[in-house]
Amino acid sequence: MFAGSEIYGGLSGVWDYGPLGTRLKENIKREWWKHMLREDHIYPLDSAILMNEKVFASSGHLEHFSDPLVECKKCKRRFRQDDLVRSSVSDEEKPSFSKCPQCGGELTQGRQFNLMFSAGEAYLRPETAQGIFTNFKNILDVFHPTLPFGIAQIGKAFRNEIAPENFLFRAREFDQLELEYFGHPEKQKQYFEDIKKMRIDWFLNLGIKKENIRFRDYQKEELAHYSQATTDIEYKFGLNESGFSELEGIAMVNK
């Protein structure tokens, strides 16, 4: 992989895939599609990247799709406030949240920073899910599926990250592989557990060792505005104290 626009100084949070990275990425996509489309009740989709502002007003993203931002008054560097909190190991260190970890300067008060890229009257999608939801009726009208069924797609998503860092973990442009599964509300929890098993089995079948992958359930305060329950599949990348970082998220949306 190479830094995006590298010969002109680069652009933080943007990466170009070279010959090996491109082949690896395409292999993963191909295996994912094979896995999803083995079931005849999963419908493939390729929705547009640019979407009407009303889509995200309706979904709650314009109001809620944000991270807490603080900025150093001295060096002007920006930080995600929750990242500074997570880096603390004891209550005694909490006063340090008012100081910049880079230069020691005073930090501003936290404020919510929306992560979506605006393109005039449209937005670059921050997730591939919205294209699935806006095409839900089209799939119903054309294919007449019965519950349960899923809609899957692979495509680009964009995030106006506060502090792009940690290689691909905080990228501004990235590929998402997404399945939205629709079913009977009274069976929601069973679908959630079934999909968790389906997804972890896929990773294990790719050859990942069982001890290097795990589930992590979100606490209530961590949940996105649309989520009733969320579990991450984490892999042992070795980038933090626990060694585990997010590989994939599985969410049960509010009814």
Image (cartoon, helix red, strand yellow):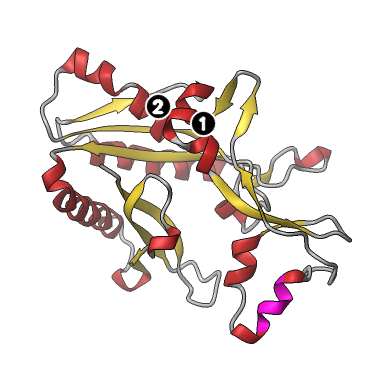
Q: Are marks 2 and 1 in contact (CB under 8 Å)?
A: yes
Question: In this orientation, does residue 75 appear?
Answer: yes
- Most foreground residue, 25 or 142: 142
Residue drawn at (65%, 68%) of the image: 84
The image quadrant that residue 236 belongs to is bottom left
Residue 45 image position (x, y, % from top left): 33, 25
Residue position marked by numbered label 2 in the rendering:
131
57 over 120 or under it: above or below: below
Residue drawn at (22%, 50%) of the image: 195
Q: Is residue 64 left or right of residue 72?
A: left
Residue position marked by numbered label 1 in the rendering:
125
Where's the C terminus, which quadrant?
A: top left
Q: Of helix, strand and loop, which one carries label 1?
A: loop
Amino acid type of the residue that numbered disc 2 sits on in the rendered structure? Gly
Asked if residue 94 lies in the magenta stretch, the reply is yes
Residue 13 image position (x, y, % from top left): 66, 46
Q: Looking at the rendered structure, which numbered label has been put on residue 77? A: none
Asked if residue 224 lies in the magenta stretch, the reply is no
Which span of residues is magenta-colored?
93-97
